């Protein structure tokens, strides 16, 4: 998106500057000058801010970093960490045009799915305002993360979660991780 927006901004800037010397739009010149800052702001969002999005695993909690906001997720909320695919979560035929355009390149990539017992309050109703709807599973509460190595993500989260549980003195009988996640600890 950033390259397309930059190209559109340059073309519109050239047209607006040309229109300044050779008036073609008449009394509507101010609309062109109003659209330029808007396109530039969109380009800044896609070029710099969207790259800030990440899941950061810390010893005390996970941080879901969005382009403009961050949410702390306690390890107490994590039920399991498994693999998934976008095609297991979203039916391509039921998606609309723009949604299909966004999901299709990632449709067959493996994903890490962090199933949560509940979503933090900050991720309640406004989660689609700050984060992509494709970050959340429509079937179960959890995060669907497209990563290069979902097993590394799983190990990192489970290791941090295990240490978090040990620091709080929680016993293994409360461990509701999948069998595969428990085996990876050994």
Image: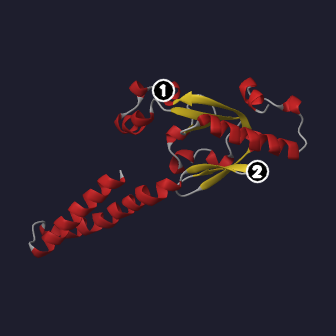
Q: Left or right? Give the position of 105 relative to 33.
A: right
Please identify, in this view, whether the residue under mark 1 or under mark 2 is nearer the observer: 2
Residue identifier under label 1? 87
Q: Position of residue 151 (x, y in %)?
A: 63, 34
Q: Left or right? Give the position of 42 relative to 25.
A: right
Residue sitting at the far front: 186
Q: Position of residue 59 (x, y in %)?
A: 76, 51
Please rate how many residues cluster around mark 2, counting C-alpha atoms within 10 Å: few if below 14, some from 14 to 19, many from 20: some
Q: Position of residue 104 (x, y in %)?
A: 40, 33
From this viewpoint, is residue 157 visible? yes
Q: Position of residue 172 (x, y in %)?
A: 87, 32
Please rate how many residues cluster around mark 1, counting C-alpha atoms within 10 Å: few if below 14, some from 14 to 19, many from 20: some
Q: Which residue shows up at 40% across the image and 36% down it?
A: 105
Q: Is residue 61 above or below residue 84?
A: below
Q: Left or right? Give the position of 61 relative to 68.
A: right
Q: Is residue 25 above or below residue 111?
A: below
Q: Is residue 117 above or below residue 123?
A: above
> Could you tell which of marks 1 and 2 lies nearer the N-terminus?
2
Q: Which of the colour schemes (rainbow, by chain, secondary structure, one colour) is used?
A: secondary structure
Find residue 59 and name its label.
2
Q: Which residue shows up at 73% across the image and 30% down it?
A: 181
Closer-to-camera residue (101/161): 161
Residue sitting at the far bottom: 21
Q: If the image is split into quadrants, where does the C terminus sit?
A: top right
Identify the secondary structure beneath mark 1.
helix
Q: Left or right? Give the position of 48 relative to 113.
A: left
Q: Quadrant of residue 119?
A: top right
Q: Which residue shows up at 41% across the image and 55% down it?
A: 46
Closer-to-camera residue (20/178): 178
Find residue 112 and name its label.
none
């Amino acid at each position: 998106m950033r390259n397309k927006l930059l190209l559109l901004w340059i073309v519109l800037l050239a047209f607006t500057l040309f229109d300044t010397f050779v008036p073609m739009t008449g009394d509507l010149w101010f609309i062109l000058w109003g659209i330029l800052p808007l396109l530039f702001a969109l380009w800044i969002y896609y070029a710099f801010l969207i790259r800030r999005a990440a899941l950061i695993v810390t010893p005390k909690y996970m941080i879901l970093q969005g382009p403009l906001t961050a949410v702390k997720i306690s390890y107490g909320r994590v039920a399991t960490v498994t693999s998934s695919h976008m095609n297991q979560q979203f039916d391509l035929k039921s998606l609309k045009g723009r949604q299909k355009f966004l999901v299709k390149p990632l449709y067959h990539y493996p994903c890490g799915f962090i199933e949560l017992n509940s979503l933090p309050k900050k991720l309640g109703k406004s989660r689609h305002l700050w984060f992509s709807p494709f970050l959340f599973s429509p079937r179960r509460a959890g995060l669907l993360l497209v990563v290069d190595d979902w097993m590394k993500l799983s190990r990192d989260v489970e290791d941090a979660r295990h240490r978090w549980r040990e620091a709080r003195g929680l016993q293994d009988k409360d461990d509701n991780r999948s069998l595969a996640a428990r085996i990876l600890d050994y």
